[in-house]
Amino acid sequence: MTRKQPPASASRRVFLSVSTAAVAGGVALHGRAAQAREPLGPGRPVAGQPPDAELRALLRDIDRQRIEATVRTLVGFGTRHTLSSQDDPRRGIGAARDWILAELRRYAEASEGRMTVELQSYVQEPAPRIPAPTRITNVVATLRGSAAPDRIYVVSGHYDSRVTDVMNATADAPGADDDASGVAVVMELARVMATRRPEATIVFTAVAGEEQGLYGARYMAKQYKSAGADVRAMFTNDIVGSSTADDGTRDPRTVRLFAEGVPTAETPAEADVRRSVGGENDSPSRQLARFTRSVAENDATGMRVRVVYRRDRYLRGGDHIGFLEQGYPAARFTEPSEDFDHQHQDVRVEGGRQYGDLPEFCDFAYIARVARVNAATLWSLAQAPGTPRGVRIRTDRLTNDSDLVWTRGPEADLAGYEVVWRETTSPDWTHVIPVGNATEVRVDLSKDNVFFGVRAVDRDGHRSPVAFPAPS
């Protein structure tokens, strides 16, 4: 192979070679072709993926008033405690379950058979916070993908609620923010997407038993795992109802996204590799969070996604943990600053201050914007190729360049791949190198000095999340 010599001022080698001729992103690469030099190495700066016309139309359909109506209806069931009545038609978790089921089935009627809705139930035997055998029921709406139906993306909120005493199943527990807000997001997404045709499958679910121990979501994740389901991402929306902090300050344009680093389900062997090559900041969940920022921070959502490098809030947890335990990428959306007077509290006035999780403390315009962040993320995931599989860095050559290999995806509209890279101290990918329809590439940057990733691109420019390579 003949290489051009870099200018005398170049401080590192900056050229790319691919094993096949390729064209991607308007950049032609012929044989082992040279890329233009960038100050920090090969490639161009990474940019976000702007919403296309189809996604913009979807985001415009999200209705703040419908979201408010959903929250108020759920609050109207008095309590939705997991241990409350399951057969009272007006009060308790059973009444809430039946209403959610009916609404989702009504949305599904517009889907021409693509969306199905079912109850997913099991009996939880006595356990912490479950004093007697109790039926836990998730309400699940599945919108089947048109091109890649086996590839699944899940979004959830929990419809159970509580007050100060987590075992009090009779007191009013309105649960407006925690978590009627999250259920309202999920139901509004189901409504606006039911009439559309995602390429991959999207699952909208309202789960139960969260306040008693994440029971419903854990059961759902285990069912997917036992069935060998290809769940590529899961998001839970939990406490996404308010933009006002406990000191009265407001941040109506930010949503937090909690994403773990070291995977919950990491095996000892995987931990050994991670300690050897790095990757503490490159779990599938972290790649999911980076993808979310790239597709959901724009003028169409009007939101900033603040990624938090934790599995959840300090020593706390949510329904995404059940999916992480099964090895699925998952993350949690939560409002920017919580007001603890309005969650997990008995409804009361004390010292002239109103306590309780009441709808008057929700910001429904804010919830609608959170729904748009979710919609932009889920729709972009479903329309893009799947995250590349089998991505590895070859270690059989001791050189100062890097060989990456991967398995070609099955998508009919797959256009090719891009290599992304960053300095090891950078929180997000900084440079991208289009490599076309190749499955192997050599980059003149040392794997000892930077982190690499690979993502897929379709003919419409939709990009997958990044896959972090393992050593080979």
Image (cartoon, rainbow, N blue to C red):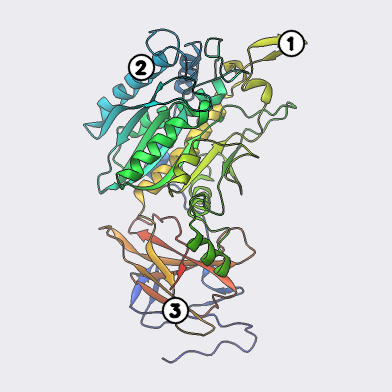
Secondary structure of the residue carrying tag 2 is: helix
Q: Distance between the residues labelled 2 and 3?
A: 56 Å
Which residue carries the number 2 mark? 98
Name the amino acid type tagged 2: Asp
Which residue carries the number 3 mark? 442
Name the amino acid type tagged 3: Arg
Of labels 2 and 3, the one closer to you? 2
Q: In this view of the protein, which residue sits in the foreground, 296 or 105?
A: 105
Q: In the rendered view of the protein, which quadrant contains the N terminus?
A: bottom left
Can residue 57 be spotted in the picture? no
Name the amino acid type tagged 1: Glu
Q: Can you say whether 28 is above or below 155 in the image?
A: below
Q: In which quarter of the image is residue 463?
A: bottom left
Q: Which residue lies furthest to the bottom in this view?
A: 2
Q: Quadrant of residue 434?
A: bottom left
Please provide percent x and percent y for residue 396. Answer: 44, 82
Q: Residue at image x 34%, y 72%?
A: 438
Mark number displayed over residue 350: 1
Answer few, some or many: residues within 10 Å of disc 2's Cα (few below 14, many 20 plus, some between 14 and 19). some
Q: In this view of the protein, which residue sits in the foreground, 107 or 201?
A: 201
Q: Are marks 2 and 3 in contact (CB under 8 Å)?
A: no
Please provide percent x and percent y for residue 437. Answer: 33, 69
Q: Does residue 404 appear to the left or right of 151 in the view shown?
A: right
Q: Can you say whether 191 is above or below 77 in the image?
A: below
Q: Which of marks 2 and 1 is nearer the N terminus?
A: 2
Q: Distance between the residues labelled 3 and 1?
A: 67 Å
